[in-house]
């Protein structure tokens, strides 16, 4: 029993599950997360010769890895009673801990510091960046007929998408708790680090004819919101 990648490209990730080809493209990412996939990345340009206040917290280091940001956030390295920088660190942490999917040794681009420092991070197409990063990662690791192992590194957006595609999601994995937009808000994950074996025995068990999969379609309400 396994999931398989099928003809995935830079524009769409295709996973074969129980006889159905499931398509995860920027459209599905938007339906699940409501992340911006429309703005032009090239419109966001900053002068890197100018100092960046957030980067100064890292002692002038030219390259800062995700794990260094995570440690700085946990240690609250901003000065006491500096709520403004605390919020900026929280935004940068959220972007790299939840929106983007690369491993924690990846270097954070200077652009991301400038976006948060300037306040323009809310207009940036994080959805496009997140999907490109995810597609690149999966297409590098997975080839057709390879097993799709769902461990703790599996992005939350992909987990929620699979739950939405599944006719019956086991209670020990996740529970639908609401009907909001985006769909990410509608699920309570009961197993935040689902193991491959447990999912194979429940959601993707070929012998369980009660569970089926189909591709998701945005509702009229979702289309009007996006």
Image (tube, rainbow, N blue to C red):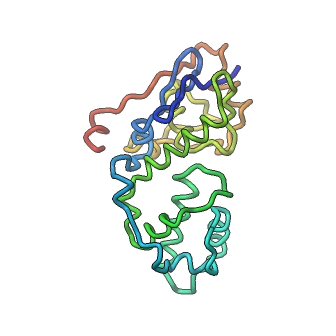
> Is 166 rendered above or below residue 73?
above
Kindly identify the residue that appears in the image at 39 percent across and 54 percent down.
41
Quarter holding the C terminus is top left
The answer to whether residue 44 is left or right of residue 6 is left
The relative height of residue 139 versus residue 87 in the rendered view (above or below) is above
Give how far across and how far down residue 111 sits, in percent: 48, 64
Pick the front one: 61 or 95: 61
- Residue at the location (62% across, 76% down)? 76
Give the residue at the far front of this rendering: 49
- Report the front residue among 160 and 135: 135
Number of marks drawn: 0
Q: Nearer the viewer, residue 206 or 146?
A: 146
Q: Which quadrant would residue 171 be assigned to in this image?
A: top right
Q: Residue at x 34, y 59 (%)?
A: 43
118 left or right, relative to 154: left
Q: Quadrant of the N terminus?
A: top right
Horizontal arrangement in the rendering, residue 77 relative to residue 13 (left or right):
right
What x and y, as percent, mark residue 158?
A: 54, 38
189 over 18 or under it: above or below = below
Residue displayed at 53% across by 71% down: 89
Q: Please, which residue is most extreme toward the right here?
A: 197
């Amino acid at each position: 029993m396994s999931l398989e990648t099928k003809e995935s490209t830079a524009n769409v990730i295709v996973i074969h599950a129980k006889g159905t080809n499931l398509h995860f493209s920027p459209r599905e990412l938007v339906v699940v997360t409501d992340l911006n996939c429309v703005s032009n990345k090239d419109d966001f340009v900053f002068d890197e010769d100018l100092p960046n206040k957030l980067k100064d917290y890292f002692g002038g280091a030219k390259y800062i890895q995700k794990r260094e940001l995570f440690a700085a956030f946990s240690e609250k390295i901003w000065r006491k009673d500096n709520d403004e920088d605390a919020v900026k660190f929280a935004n940068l942490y959220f972007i790299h801990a939840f929106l983007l999917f690369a491993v924690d040794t990846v270097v954070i681009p200077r652009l991301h510091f400038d976006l948060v420092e300037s306040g323009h991070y809310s207009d940036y197409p994080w959805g496009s960046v997140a999907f490109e990063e995810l597609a690149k990662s999966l297409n590098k690791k997975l080839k057709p007929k390879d097993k799709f192992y769902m461990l703790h590194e599996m992005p939350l957006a992909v987990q929620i998408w699979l739950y939405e595609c599944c006719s019956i999601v086991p209670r020990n994995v996740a529970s639908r708790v609401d009907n909001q937009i985006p769909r990410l808000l509608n699920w309570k994950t009961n197993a935040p680090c689902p193991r491959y074996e447990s999912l194979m025995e429940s959601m993707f068990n070929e012998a369980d004819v009660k569970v089926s999969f189909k591709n998701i379609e945005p509702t009229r309400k979702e289309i009007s919101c996006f």
